Image (spheres, rainbow, N blue to C red):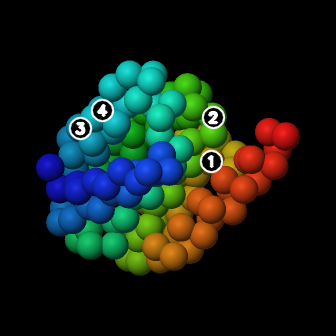
């Protein structure tokens, strides 16, 4: 699988993808994250780094299917945040399409050009969520 993952102590998950990513790759990756409702509830955020990816071999339907998986996970865990990082225009555009297909407010998903911007967005959103819970 072209994904390497690191789980952080704060409930976050950082995944780096490399090479050519297919629908099968993404579907397997999401299935490994979303095995049970408890698994989903334990993910506070995901940062998916597509910077090293050379190509997303996905159709519009494939992007829609991945968005449905994430949308279902967000219904289980409405506080989970998902950020995608890509500095390549085509991959960035496809990622924006995915974000639109999740049909969530911009409070849960984001697409960024660099990792530091994604990390900052996660931190800001977590602070905002903590303040709204009070």
Earlier residue among tags 1 and 3: 3
Q: Report the front residue among 20 and 84.
A: 84
Q: CA distance from mark 1 to mark 3?
A: 22 Å
Counting other residues with Cα less than 10 Å from the Cα at mark 2, is it few (<14), some (14-19), or many (20 or more)?
Answer: some
Query: Residue 89: percent from the left, percent from the top?
Result: 42, 75
What residue would you read off at disc 1? 108
Mark 4 and mark 1 lie on one chain; the one further toward the N terminus is 4
Q: Which residue is mark 3?
A: 28
Are the two marked residues, 1 and 3, in contact with CB atoms closer than 8 angstroms? no
User: Mark 2 or mark 4, which has the lower sequence index?
Assistant: 4
The residue under the point 81% across, 49% down is: 131
x, y percentage for residue 92?
Answer: 45, 68
Image location (x, y in percent) of residue 117: 56, 74
Mark 3–mark 4 contact, CB under 8 Å? yes
Q: Nearer the viewer, mark 3 or mark 2?
A: 2
Q: CA distance from mark 4 to mark 1?
A: 19 Å
Q: Which residue is mark 2?
A: 78
51 lies above or below 57: below
Q: Secondary structure at mark 3?
A: helix
Which residue bears the numbered disc 4?
31
């Amino acid at each position: 699988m072209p994904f390497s993952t690191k789980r952080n102590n704060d409930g976050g998950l950082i995944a780096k993808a490399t090479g050519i990513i297919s629908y099968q790759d993404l579907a397997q990756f999401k299935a490994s994250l979303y095995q049970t409702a408890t698994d989903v509830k334990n993910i506070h955020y995901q940062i998916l780094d597509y910077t090293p990816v050379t190509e997303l071999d996905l159709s519009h339907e494939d992007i829609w299917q991945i968005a449905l998986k994430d949308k279902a996970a967000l219904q289980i865990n409405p506080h989970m945040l998902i950020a995608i990082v890509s500095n390549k225009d085509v991959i960035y555009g496809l990622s924006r399409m995915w974000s639109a297909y999740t049909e969530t407010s911009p409070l849960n998903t984001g697409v960024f050009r660099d990792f530091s911007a994604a990390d900052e967005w996660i931190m800001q959103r977590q602070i905002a969520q903590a303040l709204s819970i009070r």
